[in-house]
Amino acid sequence: MVDYPQIEHVIYQADTSVPLVVMMCGVAGSGKTTYAQLLEQRGFIRLSIDEEIWATKGRYGIDYPIEMYEQLKVEAELKLRNELVNLLNKKRNVVIDFSFWQRKRRNDYKKLIEEGGGEWRLLYLKVHPNDLRERLRIRSQRFDANAAFTITEEILSSYLKGFEVPSGEGEMIVEAKK
């Protein structure tokens, strides 16, 4: 279980008339969705690529071919990005439940949020790789959008190798404790 900071600290806004967007950041299994769901309970609108694909296309490798997944991710992100702009226009608080593993992508979203009149928080969930392995093992036994496909050791190693850890980007770091 992730030891989360006080949500009030993360969602503090000096000006509550400005919409707040919390960008979840972390490797698969770090607890992004769990934290995002806590924010959702506080009135945030949660945007999730995995859940968008699950709702519109079904189950990975069952309702659509595995080779379609990358294209479906691109389409889902475009749809959710447009939804984010609409929500900012409506002055709604949003939590983006993506991995944000690339600095460039994080910066693109920060710019989009600021141009839309919003304020952002980058919340990086930092979890030791061994803890990720255990969490992913448990998650693979579930049947839901966030466990749509099993993340093998090879996939996790690839994720860890390619993940660009936020540093000096205004990030808030949440370290998992055992």
Image (cartoon, rainbow, N blue to C red):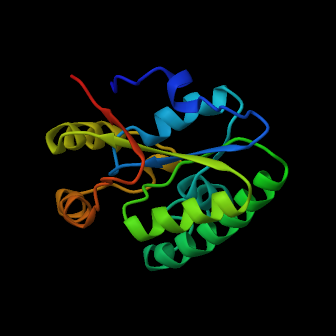
Tell me residue 79's x, y (percent). Answer: 69, 67
Which is nearer the eye, 52 or 87?
A: 87
Tell me residue 85's x, y (percent). Answer: 74, 61
Is residue 61 in view from this perspective? Answer: no
Which is nearer the eye, 73 or 175?
A: 175
Horizontally, residue 77 falls left or right of residue 6, namely right
Tell me residue 56's x, y (percent). Answer: 68, 62
Q: Quadrant of residue 29?
A: top left
Q: Quadrant of residue 128?
A: top left
Task: Kindly give the residue lying farthest to the left in the view shown.
Answer: 130
Q: Residue at x 33, y 24 (%)?
A: 1
Q: Residue at x 53, y 79 (%)?
A: 71
Q: Is residue 120 above or below residue 134?
A: below
Q: Residue at x 51, y 31 (%)?
A: 10
Q: Is residue 73 above or below residue 91?
A: below
Tell me residue 45's x, y (percent). Answer: 70, 42
Horizontally, residue 112 falls left or right of residue 35, namely right
Q: How many marks are shown on the rendered structure?
A: 0
Horizontally, residue 70 falls left or right of residue 109, namely left
Q: Residue at x 45, y 54 (%)?
A: 148
Is residue 9 in view from this perspective? Answer: yes
Task: Kindly give the residue lying farthest to the right in the view shown.
Answer: 90
Q: Is residue 128 above or below residue 90?
A: above
Which is nearer the eye, 147 or 118?
A: 118
Q: Quadrant of the C terminus?
A: top left
